[in-house]
Image (cartoon, rainbow, N blue to C red):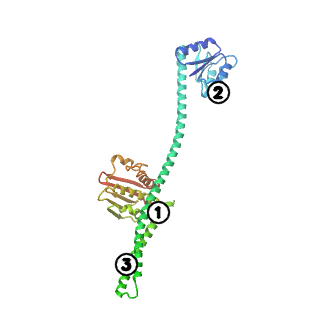
Amino acid sequence: MKVLIVDDSKMNIKIAEDCLMEYRVVEEIKSCLSGEEALEILKNEKIDLVLLDIVMPGLTGVDLLKIMNHEKWMDQTDVIMLTTVDDLLVLKECFELGATDYIQKPFNKIEFAARVKSVLKEAESERKLVRALELLEKQNIELIRVNKALKEAQNYLIEKEKMTAIGELIEGLVHEIEMPLGKLEKELNRSLSRINDLDEHISPNTVLNIKNNLIEGFSDTTDQIIKIKKLIGTLGNFSKDSRKDSRTSAKLSELVEEVLLMINSEIKTIHSVEKQYNDHSKIICNKGEVKQAIMNVLINAIHAVKDVNESKIVIHTIETEDSVICYIKDNGIGILDEDKDNVFDPFFTTKPKNENMGLGLSIAYDIIVGKHNGQLEFDSNRNRGTQFSLVFNKK
């Protein structure tokens, strides 16, 4: 740090310099004999501490202090007044102008060195604090920027996960639609073949048999058409409900049934699916979001039992005085104790990263808890399965 000694006495300057050097208070010392000379130094150099004589010819110490105060130099420079004056009003004015301390002349070397060292130490601490605050502010700005970027990336990945889930859903539905369409085409071709085989010499019994076969075939065809319409309607409702921002009333069990139809190709891989619906009241919700949450929890249960021989999923709805609850239970291997605190964390997954992004349950939690003020909880025991509870308020 750099100290400037300003005094019209060369002897006082010499004593001050020797004392500062002897006690190793500071390494760099400058000095001058007048306020005018000190003013030029302060204009051109960075000075950490000024030891300033009050009584000097021309520009006095108080005059220089006023200029330093006006130029805002006191923000970066501390001032200790050197004086033989006992006038408390003068000292009061110096402190009001920003002086840090004063030292009486003639100097006591030990006191002089200690007080200068104390002011310099405090000044260095303040400068470190200012630098730390500036660094903290820069880091805070950078943290805000990074947090915003991470939020945008997370939102992008969540939307990507939703689209991936919808893509897989559509792929499964396409497969489900292809099967009844194939049966429909086969039955129509068979019926057409029977009609082409008819001729005018055919016996009445043969006509009756063909008629019965056609009736049976067209009945089966009608069933396949109804199934296709139901599948397409469910997909259309899912797409329409997902676009809506408004909320409407719906029975939770009916939403579960729509989801089960949409993921029928995955559900068919389960050995046993039990359903027990005991809800009668409707909930107010965004149907598309709630179906997304139910689907994510069900897909998670399906993945949990994929390696179980007698795989089983139980879906049970009940209602209490204040809420409607859907329990989804599987007989999978359960969740490890060390993983339980992370189940709803974004990007947490126990599956290979190339198979799952770990957003399904996080999205479900955000929908049920964050957007519908409900609850999403689970109870899991190793090798005994996991049960998720989806709780929605009636009001």
The label number, if any, that marks residue 238 in the structure image: 1
Q: Residues within 10 Å of mark 2 (few under 14, many from 20)?
A: some
Residue 319 drawn at (x, y percent): 38, 62
Query: In this image, 70 relative to 335: left or right?
Result: right
**Residue 84's disc number:** none
Residue contact between numbered discs 2 and 3, judged by CB atoms under 8 Å: no
**Figure check: 274 above or below 380:** below
Local SS, label 1? helix
| Badge number at residue 216 | 3
> Label 2, on which residue?
69
In the displayed image of the protein, which residue is found farthest to the right? 58
Q: Amino acid at mark 3?
A: Glu
How far is mark 2 from mark 3, CA to CA? 104 Å
For the residues labelled 2 and 1, the Cα–Cα distance comes to 71 Å
Q: Residue at x 55, y 34 (%)?
A: 134
In the foreground, 8 or 205:
205
Q: Secondary structure at mark 2?
A: helix
* 335 vs 98, nearest the viewer: 335
- Which circle's residue, 2 or 3, is located before the other in the chain? 2
Q: Position of residue 377 (x, y in %)?
A: 38, 53
